[in-house]
Image: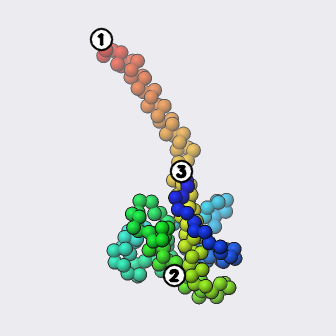
């Protein structure tokens, strides 16, 4: 799966990138799972997003305690995006993230715009992670594939059995 989104060219300090990734991971309540390359990641429900867009009220959007991002943007109209790659939902989340990042005082960077830009760039990576996570969880298991194949073979065998035994008596 390739993303049709392009990451803006930003020359950001590696330490800031690492700090933004770590802070976003905590705010989203994600947990590392041993043996998996992609940590489980969720997206906000489209019902919440629709309510936020309809009312235009921040109280229906992401909050510090319910920090969800809009990662499943397939099928959204192009006017739902700002600046070509970000949605108003994620822009609001970026504001919340930036305030939380600055309030934590564990990071050296105090440049609000730089933090927000780095977070919105990180959202693009999170969208790709979400797509990989969905692909992993939606992929049929080997046993499911085998069961489907077996059922198809039995169906084909029944058709041939019918053709060569029962239909032979009806055809004159």
Can you say whether 96 is above or below 126 in the image? Answer: below
| Residue 114 location (% of width, % of height) | 60, 80
- How many residues crowd mark 3 within 10 Å: few (<14), some (14–19), many (20+)? few
* Callout 3: SS: loop
Disc 3 and disc 2 in contact, CB within 8 angstroms: no
* Callout 1: SS: loop
Q: Which residue is mark 2?
A: 96
Q: Which residue is mark 1?
A: 172
| Residue 63 location (% of width, % of height) | 48, 80
Q: Which residue is mark 3?
A: 139
Q: Nearer the viewer, mark 3 or mark 2?
A: 2
Q: Is residue 79 left or right of residue 3?
A: left
In the figure, residue 132 lies in which quadrant?
bottom right
Number of numbered discs visible in the structure rendering: 3
Q: Earlier in the sequence, mark 2 or mark 1?
A: 2
Q: Is residue 13 left or right of residue 164?
A: right
Cα–Cα gap, marks 2 and 1: 79 Å
- How many residues crowd mark 2 within 10 Å: few (<14), some (14–19), many (20+)? some
């Amino acid at each position: 799966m390739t993303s049709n989104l392009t990451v803006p060219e930003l020359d950001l300090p590696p330490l800031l990138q690492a700090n933004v990734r770590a802070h976003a991971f905590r705010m989203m309540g994600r947990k590392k799972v041993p043996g998996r390359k992609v940590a489980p990641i969720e997206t906000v429900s489209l019902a919440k997003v629709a309510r936020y867009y309809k009312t235009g009220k921040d109280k229906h959007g992401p909050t510090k305690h319910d920090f969800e991002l809009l990662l499943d943007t397939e099928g959204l109209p192009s006017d739902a995006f700002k600046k070509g790659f970000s949605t108003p939902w994620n822009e609001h989340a970026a504001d919340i993230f930036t305030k939380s990042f600055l309030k934590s005082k564990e990071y050296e960077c105090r440049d609000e715009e730089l933090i927000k830009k780095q977070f919105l760039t990180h959202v693009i990576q999170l969208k790709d992670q979400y797509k990989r996570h969905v692909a992993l969880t939606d992929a049929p298991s080997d046993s499911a594939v085998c069961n489907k194949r077996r059922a198809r073979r039995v169906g084909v065998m029944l058709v041939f059995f019918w053709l060569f035994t029962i239909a032979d008596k009806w055809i004159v």
